[in-house]
Image (spheres, helix red, strand yellow):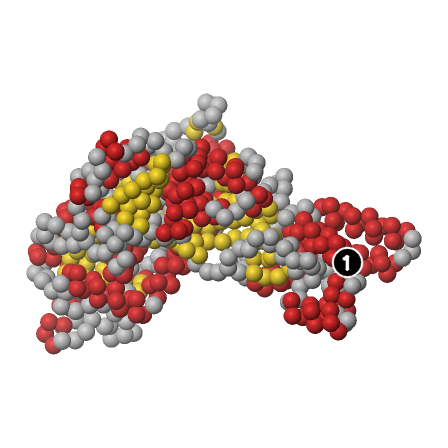
Amino acid sequence: MADPSSYRPKPGQIPDSPGVYRFRDEHRRVIYVGKAKSLRQRLASYFQDLSGLHPRTRTMVTTAASVEWTVVSTEVEALQLEYSWIKEYDPRFNVKYRDDKSYPYLAVTMNEQFPRVQVMRGQKKKGVRYFGPYGHAWAIRDTVDLLLRVFPVRTCSTGVFKNAERSGRPCLLGYIGKCSAPCVGRVSAEEHRELAEEFSDFMTGRTGTYIRRLERQMTDAAEDMEYERAARLRDDIGALKKAMEKSAVVLADATDADLIALAEDELEAAVQIFHVRGGRVRGQRGWVTDKVEAVTTAGLVEHALQQLYGEETGDSVPKEVLVPALPDPVEPVQEWLTERRGSNVSLRIPQRGDKKALMETVQRNALQALGLHKTKRASDLTTRSRALEEISEALGLDSVPLRIECYDISHLQGDDVVASMVVFEDGLQRKSEYRRFQIKGFEGQDDVRSMHEVITRRFKRYLGEKEKTGEWADGETGFTEEDGRPKRFAYPPQLVVVDGGKPQVAAAQRALDELGIDDIVVCGLAKRLEEVWLPGDDDPVVLPRTSEGLYLLQRVRDEAHRFAITYQRAKRARRFRASPLDDVPGLGETRKQALIKHFGSVKRLRSATIDQICEVPGIGRKTAESIAVAFAQAAPVAPAVNTATGEIIEDEDHEDHEAREENVDRVENVDRMEDAAPEATAGAVGEPVSAGASDERRGQER
């Protein structure tokens, strides 16, 4: 490990101007490339106290053995030089997006005498027009098959073309009218190139011109009583419209734009791009990267823009690029994109309307791509085994932890404090074993006390099940005799993970000590620096960034947080929607709905007499009296106020408005949820539930 002070340049040697710098290791290999508006200020930030640096930055500067820089005149030049050097040196500490698959493009080889339409992958070639990328090659072939009857461009390989040229006989496509057969001279090279140009124009979104032209020709042919030609043109129009239907209109006014969205965690990030041309989604692609440097969302966006447009020019760079966060500063990046396009490019964050809605769709795709990447990585048996072995070695366990339980506390500023317990067995989720808790021992915000209470309650139940089944006496297992399924809390984990640092770990260990349990290892994963804490240790265990063990611990911790915050949100929502009817004993959801349906609103139900309430099917005299008493004892409802106008809303209008809002929320939640949200049981502990919706925003929630 090198000491950064050994190669630190003197402050006077570093120019105070824009430039690009390179860190090299002891073997002169470039390990990091960066750009700066002021080289002096940026490089000085690397040579501060190591304890103040981000862990990844600290690793980089201690791996490096020298630093050098190149001065440029503008920030745009710095951006261009940084991209060139990253591409040339492939430095290990720079963010580099890698395709999660090789995407196929529809290509038109305009660099050949007789342009050819084909599916192409890999590096782009000069003189070839590309459309896409597409998710599947068959989608390209289906589109091309529809378009060839209108634009019969050559699709055959060079060998097939030359054989037909020698024999004087075209291939099958030439006979059925899906190729203009330039190989046998049916059309000249100029006429065939014009067909290829029209094909390309149609693919770029200029579809209306060709459809209107064909419609005029069809009408003229019908008027001239050339019915066969009119029928053929009618079929051509149908083929074009069918090809257009394969990509629905998502943006009005024939917009050309690229939408870029990100999903990230502490170690990895996924980017998804939708290519919209002529208002239609013409292609989609995605990348995944390891976050090998300390980088913000804006920095990830800048790296994505460099990789996406670094080799592109002209119309390949759209007029509009929509991103989730703007690079800082944004002006050099926007100027660089404008130079590459040759005309003005707008780089911005969508705020409202169709573009914002489409950006949310791209964001969901990015979240799904990151989740799929993690699932693929976690599902590999070899990888899971290595992860468990790394955890065992790092924590000094006697054997690999086949069952891991993780606990997290969630609340909103001290209200609705809940906890979650998630279980991973052999590195995989066991959702049927998930449990959730309400904190009942105290009120207010205290994560340490909450963690102590949850661990105590969980393992008291374990000890109770152990004693009940006679496991201490005769070694029987914790299975029921009726159905053979394990009882709740019947199995102990080999490892307990808590979301937090030293205080939370100490609280969990103290709870186990108080119960006399000494064969379960406790550790904590601190979110900020991804450090693993063990009870009683002054220093954390730092697993390598590329460690599969750290990756597994992170997945366990994130799942516990997701499950806890889902329960907390559901509990809070029920509290906000509380009604006097909730306090009526024996009145379930079905009869509540029947009451509201009968009277039309809560206001009318509140003013109804006991006899009127008894008219509702299923409501007896005693229940009607309980309902009347509940409304009489309830606090008066404050009038609703329209915050925009200041006027008081009538109760019925307010209730109708609330109902509409609730319906909208329900629809949005259904769209947003990955799994069914659990139905929480008030006061219940340890009920098996399904996993809930993903944690999309944190806000003030913990």
| Residue type of the residue flagged with mark 1 | Ser
Residue at 43% in and 41% down: 80
| Residue most extreme to the top | 646
Residue 676 drawn above or below residue 426: above
On the rendered image, what quadrant is the C terminus found in? top left
Left or right side of 323 for 430 = left
Does residue 150 show up?
no
Left or right side of 178 for 552 = left
Image location of residue 461, percent across then percent down: 18, 61
Comparing 242 with 448, the one in front is 242
Residue 71 drawn above or below residue 125: above
Circle 1 SS class: loop
Image location of residue 543, percent across then percent down: 21, 56
Residue at 73% in and 72% down: 166
Residue 496 drawn above or below residue 14: below
Image location of residue 275, percent across then percent down: 54, 48
Q: What is the quadrant of residue 491 in the picture?
A: bottom left
On the image, numbered disc 1 is attached to which residue?
188
Residue at 88% in and 53% down: 222
Residue at 41% in and 40% down: 79
Image location of residue 132, percent across then percent down: 56, 54
Does residue 130 show up?
yes
Q: What is the quadrant of residue 229 in the picture?
A: bottom right
Packing grade of label 1 (10 A; few <14, some 14-19, many >=20) is: some
Comparing 254 with 615, the one in front is 254
